[in-house]
Image: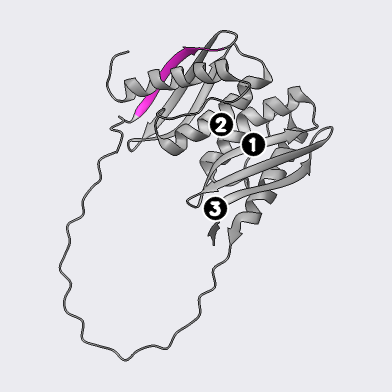
Amino acid sequence: MFYKDGSYTAKAQGFQGLVTVTVTIKEGNITELTYEHEDTPAYFKKAWKVLYPAILEKQSAKGIDTVSGATYSSEGILNAADKAIEKSITKVSVTPTATPPPTVTPTPTVTPTITPTPQDGYRDGTYTGSGDGFNGITTVVITVENGKIVSAVYETEDDEEEFYMAWSSIYAQILGNQSVDEIDTVSGATFSSEGLIEAFQNALNQAKGETQ
């Protein structure tokens, strides 16, 4: 059973209206989630800020706790995401084949195991970077494990809905690319996007051992 590449959309009931979530699958992995909603904006934003990175990190919407103070909005997001992900699941059936007669197999040559070097050369740890957003400074904290970016959180003075649109897209792109190279800004949220990209770049420079 695996995720089939493509975009899948589903709906579920939130606090005061329907929540629609679209899940994008690339190379068998969940790389991005986008939304439309008729829910109460304040509760929805609070839930989405926590649940979006949690679903990306877990690669599933199952077993994720709702957000305190935004329970019904959380349930709408999780249920819609789970339904969308279910649409992408392909069950592979294996047809048994006849067992061939045994043959003499030569003793295999032992091949040494090569430990790969992280492509981007990131050093494990937690790194903080900042950038100028639309309404002020945006700070991003990334976590690197085994040379790979595994998660990120933010603090920002931006409180507009456009910031959350920018975060959803850029966070997914950076996790997928493992770099800020060729990251697209979000239409309608250009300044918030640029602030996030700058903050990620600063943090990743530190992870590479480069001075800012």
Nearer-N-terminus badge (3/2)? 3
Q: Nearer the viewer, residue 124 or 36?
A: 36
Nearer-N-terminus badge (3/1)? 3
Query: Which residue is under mark 2?
Result: 169
Tell whether position 130 is magenta: yes
Query: Which residue is under mark 1?
Result: 34
Tag 2: residue type?
Ser
Q: Residue at x 58, y 30 (%)?
A: 168
Which span of residues is magenta-colored? Answer: 125-133
Nearer-N-terminus badge (1/2)? 1
| Magenta-colored segment: predominant secondary structure | strand
Drawn side of residue 162 relative to residue 36, left or right: left
Tag 1: residue type?
Thr
Q: Residue at x 15, y 68 (%)?
A: 109
Which of the numbered marks, if any, corresponds to residue 5?
3
Tag 3: residue type?
Asp
Q: Residue at x 17, y 57 (%)?
A: 112
